[in-house]
Structure formats: C-alpha cells, structure tokens
Image (tube, grey):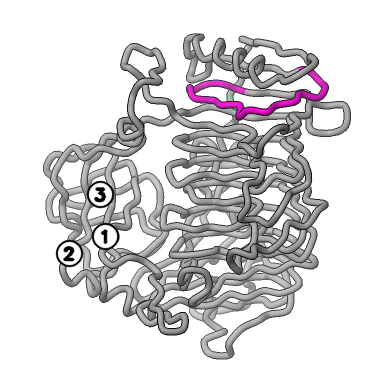
Amino acid sequence: MFFAMMEAAEVPCSLVGNGPELKYIKTERGDQICDFSYAGYGGGGVAFPTSNNKKTVGVSNGDASDAIQSAINQVASMPLVEGVRGVVELSAGTYNCSKTIAIKSSGIILRGAGMAAGGTVIKLTGKPHIGIELAHEVSTGDGKESKKKSKADAASEGKAKSQGKPIKIADDYVPSGTRLLNLEQVNGLKVGDTIEISRDATKAWIHFMEMDTLMDGNKLETWMKEDRPISHQRVIKAINGKEVTVDVPLTDSIDSRFLTKSSATVAKVEPAKLISKCGIEGIRLEAPAPAGDWRDPQFIGIIINNSEDIWVKNVGSKNTFPDLQVSQDSSRVTVDSLKTEHPGEIKQSDKSNGYASYVRLLGSQVLMNRCSMSGDNAFYISTADTSSNLNVVLNSTFQGDGSIQPHMTWSTGLLLDGCKLNQGAIIIRNRGKAGSGHGWTMGWSVVWNCSAKSITVEQPPGATNWCIGSSGKYEVDEKGKNTWLFMKGSTVSPSSLYLAQLRARLGDTAVKVVN
C-alpha cells in the first residue's frame, strides 16, 4: 500500500497509487512529478541490439590504439542492419593505448571480455587524453567521412535546423511534467515532426529566481546570461485542434509572467545529425594516478557527444577524471553497471575552489543503473546546464565522502532512486556565488528511497524539489520544509519510482529489460 491512511491533499509529493495506473496529484498550477520512465536507451525499457558481424582484435606488444581504431573503421564501412553494423571484439588481455579510440558512425559495438580480472583492460598511456569518444563526424553526403570540412560545418551538422517560423504557445502557464501544449495555431505541424520548445531567460525571470544579486566582493556574478534561449526538443505524438501532445514530458514550467519582451514558442526543426545504436561493453579503462589538481590535464574515461540511443554496460574505470560525460547534445543513454575507482584522491584545485566530477550528466534522458563509484573529495555526479534534464540514477552505490550535486546554472528533472551514500551527501541547493555564480542548480528533482550521511534539498522560487522515503541527516531551513520532505527515515512503496513508472507505461517486459 502506498501512503496508506493519508488524504491525497496531505501528500507533499505528487505521486499516489501503486500499480498499473499511477495517479498524480497536481499543484494549483498543474505541476506534477515527472514521468522519469523515458530515461534510458530507446526512451526507456528497450533492449540493447546486437550483431553477428564481428571483427576481433587480439592483444599485441606495443601501442594498440591504431589496431583498435582500424577495426572500428572497418566495421563502420559495413551496412546497417536494423540500425547496427557490427561488433569490434577485444580479446582478454591488456591493450596499451596512447590515443583516443573514436566511434564516429552509428551501429558500432565495442565489446571486451569483461571488466573483472581476466577480462579486457585498456591502459591509457602517454599524454592525458580521452579513452573512448563517441561523436558524429561530418559526412560528405555519399556515406564517406570527410576530414576537410571546417569546424563550423561540423558544428552546423551537429545542431537542429529551423524549418519554419516560431509559433507562440497560447498557455499562460505550462506546468512541469506535462506533455500538452496549447498553441496559437498549428499550421505546418504534423504528427512525427520534431519541434523545439523555447523561452528566454529574461531579466524578470532571473530576478524572480533571486539570481540578479549574486555578489563576489564588488563583482556581480552572472548566473545565467539575460535573454539566453532555453530550448528543448520533442516529437509531436498527437494534434487535437490547437493542442499538441509531445512524446516526452517537459521537466520545467514556462510562466508567461516573466516573458516581458518575448514569448514561449514552438518551431519545427530538422533534427541534428547524430550517431545512434552504439554500445561499449565489458571493458576496464585504467589510467596512471592523477597528477596535479583537477584543473590540470587528466586522463578521461568515456565522452559521449552528438549521440542518441547509446549504452555503456559492465565498464570499469580507474583514475579517470571524469569517468564518463554525456554531453549537451546527447540523449537516451543507458549506463548499466559502471564501476569507477579513485584510490588516489585528486586534489582540490589551486586555480579555483571546485572539485573534480566523476560523472557529468549534461545531456537528457540518461539512465544510470546499478553503478558503483568510490573516491573522496569529488562530485560523484554533477549537472551543469539547462540541457541536463530528465535523468535518473537508479539503485547505485557511492563509497567515500563525495556528493551527488547539481553543479551550476539551472537543470531540471533529476531522479535519485534507491541510491546509497553511506559517507557521502546528496545536495540540491542554491550554490549562490560559488564558482562563477552557480546559483540555483536544480528544480523539479526527486530523491526517492535514498540513504546518505547528509541530505540537503532546497526549494527554488516557482519550483519544487522532493525528498521522499529517504534517510540521513537533513540539512534544511525550517521554512517550507513540509513542502518537500516526506516519510523521513522510512522507505515508501513502490520501492523504485522509475521502475513503477516504467511498468505503468510499458508493462513488466520493459521492467525486466532494466532489471
């Protein structure tokens, strides 16, 4: 039973019910806890593909970078079959690599013999560099990669292109968690179109967020540049009159009161050219102990750029900073059973007051499941941009005195579900003038059935962050605490919000894929 013997109006979180028909209580303005089940490969609950086409690379003396890259390039020339070209299989053993291993085409799986002892180790050597990078490479249009195009051309292909004039959103208020938008007109739009939903970070909104008075001495810090566009892409699933239903819920609200010189709009766009259906499996990345502090060049584990529908499974890393980054232009990523180790604490920077991040979630719809991280004096998981939204960290453990902490600017829709930080902290707050004026870092997040040494969950103006069924020392201002803290120190049912939402949307089969 879920929230037994309580009136719905008394429940500070928006979710009530436990079963195939989850029910959500809405705020007076229509906001609700987001359906996080859309996070992950394929939009959640979708099995990873595989292929019988294989190119095997064996262990050899010397630098293995070129041999692995050559095998990847050969698989890249194979035809796509249901979105997949083939597998580059690394035999058990140690591969010394002084160069970045790059995956620049869709449908490539890089698979080792496992991250445990006796498996596949990629040992990063030479100067600090990225271990494995996924990134779309500009194409000439004939299927052949081009190295002659400029960086500007590459950047252009990596961005969505407008295909129509912006259409104003008619709603005075678009609530967080909704999939519905009422437009002034729908001419030129159809089901299946990709649209960009945009509003500006206006002076009025920045003032409402109390982020226009961040002072560091006599210097005014800039939380977010005035009139900066905040945009998110969605696909139209239905049109009913002037009402449009999109594929994935919005993780932030849009309030017309603060759009004094502009309007929230929808515009049809041509999606960016991204690589997709690529996986990294059964590999351990090892780097030398870090030198200097976190601001100095360090070996990096995996970077995911310009990509969608990607998975990283059963991968380990040691001494890489960060271990993993999902960049702003990437989405629908599953990271399953990532294990990272940092036996040598990386120093806090002499160049700034910041800390290293082990995982940087800058993209959207990322699911981290059954991951394990160890180390001190770091952000285990951080966010840093408005592009970071609808991300989930599920059933993961963290050893050391670090923290899970949205880091800067304004991210929305983060779910921490069943996470354990026995000596660490969960911190969702206004970071104020820290750094360059990090300010409010997160809205519309949920901490669900987690345990930590300490928990801080603060409330931004006009948004809510929930802490439900979680245990730890609560660092909280007494003002308004009942709006976010529920079942302190006791777990609630369902045990996993993400899995309950996935079951409600797609059924038990999708849940079995994740479990």
Label 2 – label 3 distance at C-alpha: 21 Å
Most extreme residue toward the bottom, as rendered? 478
Reply above or below: 230 against 300.
below
Quickly name the residue at label 2: 262
Quadrant of res 474: bottom right
Residue 287, x across and y down, in percent: 75, 39
Residue at 75% x, 44% y: name it: 339
Q: CA distance from mark 2 to mark 1?
A: 8 Å
Judge whether residue 440 can be spotted in this image.
Answer: no
Q: Nearer the viewer, residue 273 or 1?
A: 273
In this rendering, the answer to whether 74 lies above or below 110 is above
Magenta segment, which residues?
91-109
Task: Decide whether residue 353 is among the magenta residues.
Answer: no
Tag 3: residue type?
Answer: Val
- Dot 2 or dot 1: first in sequence order is 1
Q: What amino acid is at disc 2?
A: Ser
- Under circle 3, the secondary element is strand
Q: Which residue is mark 3?
A: 244
Q: Return the residue at label 1.
A: 199
